[in-house]
Amino acid sequence: METVHISAKADYGMRALLELTAVYLENPKQLVKGDAISTAQGIPVKFLEGILRQLRQSGIVASQRGAEGGYRLDRSPSEVSIADVVRALDGPLAAVRGQRPEDVDYAGPSEHLKEVWVAVRAAMRDVLEHITLADVAANDLPAPVTRLLDEPGAWQRRKP
């Protein structure tokens, strides 16, 4: 199995949304220019525009054109999970060779490998569906997540 991969798109999208979260908490209707988000987070502006377009199409971000235009969250930060963002930008949380884990079939000694892949997806869901933009912005991660961070070796790299 490959390493869990967080795409640049998902990482940049989360960072952009956390910029919008900070503004939302001050004034939910205030718009932020894409250039301001790009500068604040060091995200290439053209790449960011595509990300914000996808987030708008998913109902996470609202936008307004014009000189006074910009972007804002379209929902409360407490209603947007990290899973929502990853799915909006990258599709399903887990795939095996482009298929959903429950749709793969194996034979012989590999027969039960499907269960492992489904469990991996369930573990990812367990973390990503229970953390919201508001949680990250407030550094208030749910207890099950902080317990994972406190596990021995959680912060250690493993050799391939």
Image (tube, rainbow, N blue to C red):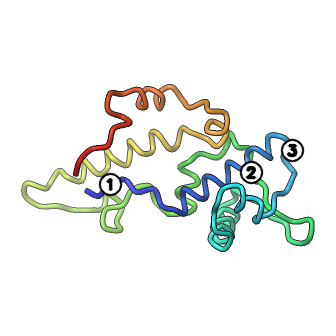
Image point (32%, 43%), residue name: 157
Left or right placement of residue 108 versus residue 21 in this view: left
Image x and y of residue 98, in percent: 35, 68
Image x and y of residue 26, in percent: 84, 41
Q: Residues within 10 Å of mark 1 (few under 14, many from 20)?
A: few
Label number found at residue 20: 2
Image point (46%, 28%), residue name: 144
Q: Which of marks 1 and 2 is nearer the N terminus?
A: 1
At label 3, the amino acid type is: Asn
Asked which quadrant contains residue 43, the reply is bottom right
Between the C-alphas of marks 3 and 1, the distance is 39 Å
Q: Earlier in the sequence, mark 3 or mark 1?
A: 1
Secondary structure at badge 2 equals helix
Q: Earlier in the sequence, mark 2 or mark 3?
A: 2
**Quick check: 116 above or below 67?**
above
User: Cβ–Cβ below 8 Å for labels 3 and 1?
Assistant: no
Between the C-alphas of marks 1 and 2, the distance is 30 Å
**Quick check: 126 above or below 86?**
above
Between the C-alphas of marks 2 and 3, the distance is 10 Å
Secondary structure at badge 3 equals loop
**Observer-nearest of 82 and 57:** 82
Task: Name the residue carrying label 1.
Answer: 3
Image x and y of residue 127, in percent: 47, 39
Q: How crowded is mark 3: few (under 14 residues within 10 Å), some or many (20 or more)?
A: few
Image x and y of residue 19, in percent: 71, 50
Single out the residue that lies furthest toward the right: 68
Task: Name the residue carrying label 3.
Answer: 27
